[in-house]
């Protein structure tokens, strides 16, 4: 009788842990939002950490900053789908930012898609 009671308690604890460890469905959905992105007139360099872990081959990219951020990030010239960067121009863009819930292992977890160019200014 005592053994049966212990088995029931163990089973109940196992069931409680199993239910508590389940992730919510929301954690598996991509997060999509509209954000303002600023693009610098100057290019920068970045390194492909997968193909060049020793940082020996710099890649020229555009510098972007999301509204509210204080830091510029250098990214590929093709990071924003539908946008063609021209060096020497500053841009303010409205983009659709998708943060992937399950990104590919060897890729970024954020995707940008151009909605519209809010402003473009040639820097001399």
Image (cartoon, grey):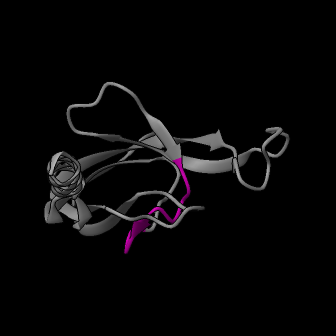
Residue 91 position in % (x across, y down): 32, 50
Residue 13 position in % (x across, y down): 19, 47
The quarter of the picture where residue 64 lies is: top left
Q: Is residue 77 left or right of residue 13?
A: right
**114 is higher (above) or lower (below) than 61:** below
Q: Nearer the viewer, residue 58 or 106?
A: 106
**95 is higher (above) or lower (below) than 82:** above
Magenta highlight: main SS: loop
**105 is higher (above) or lower (below) than 37:** below
The quarter of the picture where residue 96 lies is: bottom left
- Which range is magenta? 75-83
Q: Nearer the viewer, residue 46 or 49?
A: 49
- Residue at 54 percent across and 59 percent down: it is 77
Q: Is residue 111 left or right of residue 47?
A: left
In the picture as drawn, the residue positioned furthest to the top comes out as 70
Residue 37 position in % (x across, y down): 28, 48
- Magenta run includes residue 55: no
- Residue at 51 percent across and 65 percent down: it is 78
Residue 104 position in % (x across, y down): 51, 67
**116 is higher (above) or lower (below) than 69:** below
């Amino acid at each position: 009788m005592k053994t049966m009671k212990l088995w029931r308690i163990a089973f109940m604890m196992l069931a409680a842990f199993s239910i508590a460890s389940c992730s919510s469905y929301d954690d598996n959905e991509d997060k999509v939002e509209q954000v303002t992105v600023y693009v610098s007139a100057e290019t920068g360099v970045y390194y492909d950490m997968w193909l060049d872990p020793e940082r020996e081959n710099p890649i020229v990219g555009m510098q972007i900053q999301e509204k509210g951020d204080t830091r510029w990030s250098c990214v590929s010239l093709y990071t924003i789908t539908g946008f063609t960067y021209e060096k020497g121009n500053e841009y303010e863009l409205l983009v659709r930012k998708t943060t992937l819930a399950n990104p590919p292992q060897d890729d970024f977890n954020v995707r940008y898609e151009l909605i519209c160019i809010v402003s473009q200014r040639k820097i001399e």
